[in-house]
Amino acid sequence: MPDTLKQVVTVGVTGASGALLAQKALELLERDSRVARIHLVVTEAGQRLFAEELAIASGDLKQLPGRLLGRPTAKIELLPNKDIGASIASGSYAVDSMIVVPCSMGTLAAIASGVSDDLVSRAADVMLKENRKLVLCVRDTPFSRIHLENMVRAQQAGAVIMPAIPAFYHHPQTIDDLVTQYIFRVLAQINLRQENMYRWTGQPSAKKAEA
Ligand SMILES: Cc1cc2nc3c(=O)[nH]c(=O)nc-3n(C[C@H](O)[C@H](O)[C@H](O)COP(=O)(O)O)c2cc1C
């Protein structure tokens, strides 16, 4: 596939629990031949979550993608969250889709209210104004009225609200099974269906009865 037909994806990582979800999304996107480029933006709180949950310290931020993948990668470009003049801050730069994984209630609020004072929220704002795919993997529990209203606002503006809620119908045996199936569903939202994704095909008991 020529590079011009491949996807450019932005991944925003914010300070909600679920650093593993971000790591899995980056792993799968990085090895996907349909993806040409990944722009990665990690908020300060997101960096803290990588340290807390995966013991991956940012150190020199440029080395974070390599640390997350366990090997160097040229496909992921890390952009500083403070750089509101980066490529992805403009609608004239072609990004096909953006995932915010995990998405904190703070960043959700910024996106829902159009406050674009950092690169994650500005890039998300651009996706909405340009009618491009934006998936918000929101995470907190329980949700307050404010969180829920912000989700409605973002969804009405065009975002997909994809709470970090795992499925159990594929009989997961490990945390990786839970995380992978969830991220498979997220990637399906941006037209990157994964061959190994479990697909429910109806209840076995109902099928037996039909036979
Ligand atoms: C260990 C830890 C876990 C957190 N988990 C969540 C969470 O699951 N959801 C959430 O909305 N905020 C969570 N927070 C709070 C956010 O990190 C905080 O509101 C932060 O300001 C969000 O900033 P950001 O949106 O710029 O990343 C957590 C903070 C820490 C330190």
Image: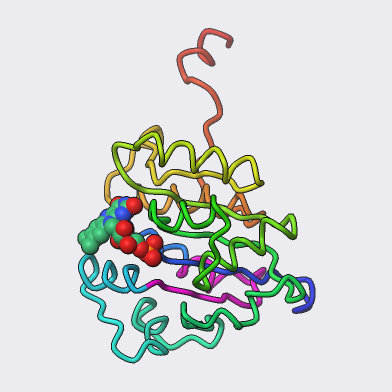
Q: Where, by quadrant of the figure, is residue 70 drawn?
A: bottom left
Q: Position of residue 133 (x, y in %)?
A: 66, 55
Up/down of 79 relative to 170, above or below = below
Q: Residue at x 20, y 68 (%)?
A: 52
In this view, the residue in front, 27 or 116, is 116
Within the displayed image, which quadrant is ligand 1 positioned in?
bottom left
Look at the image and name its color scheme: rainbow
The residue positioned farthest toward the top in the image shown: 209
Q: In percent of the image, x 46 and y 52: which residue is there?
A: 109
Most foreground residue, 53 or 123? 123
Camera sees residue 15:
no
- On screen, residue 35 above or below 180: below
| Magenta-colored span | 26-43
Image quarter in which the C terminus is found: top right
Number of marks: 0
Q: Position of residue 76 (x, y in %)?
A: 52, 81
Q: Quadrant of the N terminus?
A: bottom right
The image position of residue 156, as x and y in percent, is 63, 40
Residue in view at x 26 percent, y 77 percent: 56
- Confirm whether the magenta stretch covers residue 40: yes
Q: Is residue 123 magenta?
A: no
Q: In the rendering, at what x and y percent does residue 204 appear?
A: 47, 20
The answer to whether residue 138 is left or right of residue 157 is left
Question: Does residue 44 appear left or right of residue 74 in this picture?
Answer: left
Residue 186 shows in this picture: yes
Q: Is residue 74 above or below residue 194?
A: below
